[in-house]
Image (cartoon, rainbow, N blue to C red):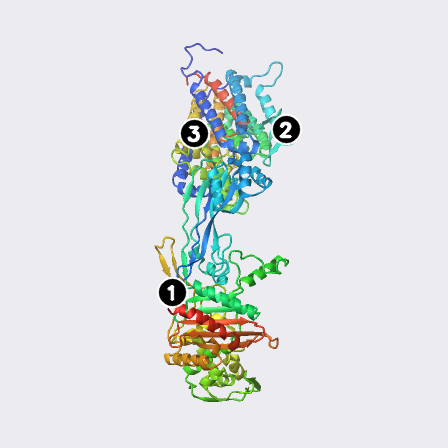
């Protein structure tokens, strides 16, 4: 017979039971605490874990020219995919997709029969075809809207506009600099998924509508762009040049009407390799593409040669170290310290005024004038013209000026700087500084972007570019314009003249480094009208064959451009 | 041993309420196992009923055991078997030792632990058998000489047979060892007249645990780091997923079968983490009802223990009560990250055939005792 239970043992059981009850109650409180106080924090984390986003692409902002002509738009395309678990009649799906998309049945069968959450059949499917597929309403076949960037004028302004990659991201040009305005906000379809990523059927679907990107209005002018491109191509072919750059700009505010860097490439097929690059290793292929996309107007520096004399002249006038009527002598060279620097006219220009020196583009005259300005005077003025820093253009990849260190500049260096040699800057930098000199002394930031507007046109953002006055005095500006006008009417820039308009210009010829290879760059900067410049243009021809003097190769291009553009522009 | 009707306690009848609560929990467990495992079962086994079927087998075996055990008089276990000098309790103890030894050598390894024996295609977890053996063994030792429970020597003598089993269990299964130790110590505590010694022992243990948690940074196990930093610890994934599940429950839950977390976010959600799925699908109300059901279950067993006919049967009931309560408390505490993680199933509800079968057999013991009660 077993012993009886004692009272103290009953108390023990009771005590233990009470402890357990209290613990259970505490745990229940803990559960309530997690469900209540932590619900939001953990709930958000859990939802994040469960929801799978399917992006709805936002339409990228369009790009327009100054008159509202469309330059870059979008085409509606679709991505077709199949969801294995939702396909009901695989054979029907395979046959239908194969017929409509013109893809081999075998290939589609492989994708339809593959056990995966989602298999992409084809992207960039044209709208009329995707509509057919959607109308067929086959279970398990998904049609997702997408956009493909489309450039209306294939090659026009390719290096300025730029293009986008597959993920709606700008790769070069304006598409990069205005990416944040153009991109818009992708929307999303939020679906619930399991930890393995399969979408749950009938799971709650949330839809967040996409916000289209903002449209960009540029200062580009379609007509001028087209004409400048044709002209560049014509010259390039005639002179068998390596490349031709034409920039046409408003010198008063820096709005770029046209920027051409021939050869241009097809924006709708930017990844097509240049001829001969197909067999290169992948890295070399990428280099070839980058070279093809490079905008030399902005990204490459060169020795400006005589076109730079505009700046030397302005510096000397501003420093009041020379008058237009001061006389100089040119024996065909000038000895500077131990160096003999030659004039392009080896027989010499003889005795001439400063104005005649400008008209003749005489090197000894500019060497003398440069010496009068002095090293610190020259650097001070170049700084004031902005010539030593970037223009701040709204295009990516701008190169900076490569100039001597001021402390290293002696008489010889100062002499060569005075006529545009021994340092490098970009064509756009030179054009912007020249603009400030001829427009009365207001600095300009060259730019393409003018304003951006939300898709519905409700919000408009105008882009501001800083300008400071007093780069040169009005007097200097007037004198410089007048002298440059004379260069066209009676000097080396005769060919830049346009019938019925007063044009001012300065030409330039520079031998490429290393010297002695007979490779030249001929260039010309011209503006019109001389009295009140409304347009400034730069033509730069890289390695022309045969005749290479700026006055005979580049100046006529400026002339033709103005004959065709000025009537349209000054109307 | 038949008593006349007059001597019988009005309560001395089969406790139908306890049976109902148990059956409710078992039925609810099957439902939740189906709900929480069907996705994993479909993905991994190709049959959404895979785990439900296996559990159902355990439940049926358990119900048969319960029926047999409840109709056998509890004193049978301490009877000397005729023609031998061996009591049945020793044979049960021997079987437990044998199974625990066998599992160390021929056990089947799952998730890196050798805890299961494969018998005729069915897996058996010996540590569950050990739990019932320990309850009977300790109850037997205590009733043999209740007075020595006041001394350290007495505690030592009772714990000696338990220690052998504990040693065999702890090698592969720390969590079961904790439960077994809890049962044995709890039963000793209840039976002792002077409990000061026990409180000293408990105080020392709690003190050591606190010291270990707060200052043992150099040598404490990773589990404690996970417990303290569940949201940032890289291995806190499973517990954190459980907390997500509980947090998404709200008042009424997301609805039966609608859990998101069981879709492979919580690995093996039908096992130790099943309470998290209950919270997610049935909310505060469901979790409250489940905890209440366990409370009621423990209360019914407590009542039977209080009115048990003798010390042996009272200790058996106490042991069963401790067993169930300790597992419920540790399981829910782990799921709610109230204590460091350890793998203990929720009685009757978590997946595990041996566990549910043995628990039902233990309930059979208690139900059998309930029919023998007499006035206190």
For mark 2, does the 10 Å Cα neighbourhood hold few (<14), some (14 to 19), or many (20 or more) residues?
Answer: some
Q: Chain of mark 3?
A: B
For mark 1, does the 10 Å Cα neighbourhood hold few (<14), some (14 to 19), or many (20 or more) residues?
Answer: few
Residue A184 is left or right of residue B57, and the answer is left
Asked if residue B312 is positioned above or below residue A539 in the image, the reply reads above
Residue A102 is left or right of residue A474, and the answer is right
Residue underneath mark 1? A464
In this view, the residue in front, A184 or A191, is A184
- Are callouts 2 and 3 both on one chain? yes
Residue underneath mark 3? B290
| Residue B70 placement (x, y as % from top left) | 50, 18
Element under disc 3: helix
Asked if residue A247 is positioned above or below residue B323 in the image, the reply reads below
Q: Nearer the viewer, mark 2 or mark 3?
A: 3
Specify whether residue A564 is in view. yes
| Residue B198 placement (x, y as % from top left) | 48, 33
Residue sitting at the far top: B4
């Amino acid at each position: 017979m077993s012993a009886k239970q004692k009272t103290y043992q009953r108390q023990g059981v009771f005590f233990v039971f009470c402890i357990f009850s209290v613990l259970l109650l505490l745990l229940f409180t803990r559960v309530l605490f997690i469900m209540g106080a932590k619900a939001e924090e953990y709930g958000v984390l859990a939802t994040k874990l469960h929801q799978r986003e399917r992006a709805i692409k936002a339409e990228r902002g369009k790009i327009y020219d100054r008159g509202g002509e469309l330059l870059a738009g979008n085409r509606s395309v679709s991505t077709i995919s199949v969801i294995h678990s939702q396909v009901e009649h695989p054979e029907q799906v395979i046959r239908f997709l194969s017929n409509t998309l013109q893809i081999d049945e075998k290939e589609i069968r492989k994708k339809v029969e593959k056990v995966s959450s989602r298999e992409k059949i084809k992207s960039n499917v044209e709208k009329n075809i995707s509509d057919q597929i959607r109308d067929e309403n086959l279970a398990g076949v998904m049609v997702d809207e997408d956009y493909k960037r489309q450039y209306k004028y294939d090659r026009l302004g390719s290096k300025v506009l730029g293009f986008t990659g597959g993920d709606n991201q700008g790769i070069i040009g304006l598409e990069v600099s205005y990416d944040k305005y153009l991109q818009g906000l992708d929307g999303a379809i939020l679906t619930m998924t399991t930890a393995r990523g399969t979408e749950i059927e009938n799971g709650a679907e949330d839809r967040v509508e996409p916000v289209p990107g903002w449209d960009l209005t540029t200062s580009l002018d379609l007509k001028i762009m087209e004409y400048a491109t044709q002209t560049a191509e014509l010259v390039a072919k005639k002179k068998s040049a390596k490349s031709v750059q034409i920039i046409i700009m408003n010198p008063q505010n820096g709005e770029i009407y046209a920027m051409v860097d021939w050869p241009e490439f097809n924006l709708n097929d930017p990844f097509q390799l240049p001829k001969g690059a197909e067999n290169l290793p992948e890295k070399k292929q990428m280099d070839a593409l980058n070279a093809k996309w490079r905008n030399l107007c902005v990204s490459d520096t060169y020795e400006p040669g005589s076109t730079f004399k505009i700046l030397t002249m302005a510096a000397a006038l501003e420093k009041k170290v020379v008058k237009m009527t001061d006389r100089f002598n040119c024996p065909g060279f000038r000895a500077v310290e131990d160096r003999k620097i030659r004039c392009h006219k080896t027989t010499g220009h003889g005795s001439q005024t400063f104005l005649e020196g400008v008209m003749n583009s005489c090197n000894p005259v500019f060497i003398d004038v440069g010496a009068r300005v002095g090293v610190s005077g020259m650097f001070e003025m170049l700084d004031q013209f902005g010539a030593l820093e970037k223009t701040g253009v709204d295009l990516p990849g701008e190169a900076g000026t490569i100039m001597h260190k001021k402390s290293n500049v002696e008489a010889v260096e100062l002499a060569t700087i005075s006529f545009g040699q021994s340092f490098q800057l970009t064509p756009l930098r030179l054009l912007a500084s020249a603009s400030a000199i001829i427009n009365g002394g207001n600095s300009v930031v060259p730019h393409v972007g003018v304003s951006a507007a939300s898709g519905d046109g409700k919000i408009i953002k105008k882009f501001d570019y800083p300008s400071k006055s007093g780069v040169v005095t009005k007097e200097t500006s007037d004198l410089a314009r007048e002298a440059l006008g004379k260069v066209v009417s009676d000097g080396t820039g005769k060919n830049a003249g346009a019938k019925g308009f007063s044009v001012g210009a300065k030409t330039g010829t520079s031998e490429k480094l290393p010297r002695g290879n007979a490779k030249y760059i001929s260039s010309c900067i011209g503006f019109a009208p001389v009295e009140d410049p409304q347009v400034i243009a730069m033509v730069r021809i890289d390695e022309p064959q045969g005749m290479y003097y700026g006055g005979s190769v580049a100046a006529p291009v400026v002339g033709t451009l103005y004959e065709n553009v000025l009537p349209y522009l000054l109307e | 041993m038949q008593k006349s009707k007059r001597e019988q306690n009005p309560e001395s009848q089969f406790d139908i309420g306890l049976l109902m609560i148990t059956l409710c929990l078992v039925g609810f467990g099957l439902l939740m196992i189906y709900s929480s495992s069907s996705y994993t079962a479909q993905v991994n086994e190709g049959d959404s009923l895979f785990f439900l079927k296996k559990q159902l087998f355990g439940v049926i075996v358990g119900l048969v055991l319960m029926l047999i055990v409840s109709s056998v008089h509890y004193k049978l276990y301490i009877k000397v078997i005729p023609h031998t000098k061996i009591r049945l309790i020793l044979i049960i103890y021997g079987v437990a030792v044998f199974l625990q030894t066998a599992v160390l050598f021929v056990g089947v390894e799952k998730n890196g632990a050798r805890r299961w024996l494969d018998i005729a295609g069915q897996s058996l977890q010996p540590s569950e058998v050990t739990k019932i053996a320990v309850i009977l063994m300790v109850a037997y030792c205590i009733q043999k000489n209740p007075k020595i429970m006041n001394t350290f020597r007495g505690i030592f003598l009772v714990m000696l047979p338990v220690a052998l089993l504990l040693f065999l269990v702890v090698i592969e299964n720390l969590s079961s060892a904790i439960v077994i130790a809890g049962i044995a110590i709890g039963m000793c505590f209840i039976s002792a007249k002077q409990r000061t010694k026990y409180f000293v022992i408990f105080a020392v243990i709690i003190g050591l645990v606190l010291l270990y948690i707060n200052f043992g940074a150099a040598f404490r196990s990773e589990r404690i780091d996970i417990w303290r930093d569940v949201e940032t610890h890289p291995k806190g994934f499973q517990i954190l997923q459980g907390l997500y599940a509980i947090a998404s429950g709200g008042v009424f839950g997301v609805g039966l079968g609608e859990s998101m977390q069981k879709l492979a976010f919580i690995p093996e959600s039908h096992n130790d983490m099943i309470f998290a799925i209950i919270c997610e699908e049935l909310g505060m109300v469901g979790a409250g009802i489940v905890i209440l059901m366990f409370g009621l279950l423990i209360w019914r067993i407590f009542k039977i223990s209080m009115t048990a006919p003798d010390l042996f049967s009272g200790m058996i009931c106490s042991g069963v009560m401790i067993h169930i309560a300790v597992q419920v408390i540790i399981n829910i505490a782990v799921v709610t990250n109230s204590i460091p993680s350890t793998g203990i199933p929720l009685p009757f509800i978590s997946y595990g055939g041996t566990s549910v079968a043995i628990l039902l057999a233990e309930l059979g013991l208690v139900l059998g005792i309930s029919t023998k009660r007499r006035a206190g």
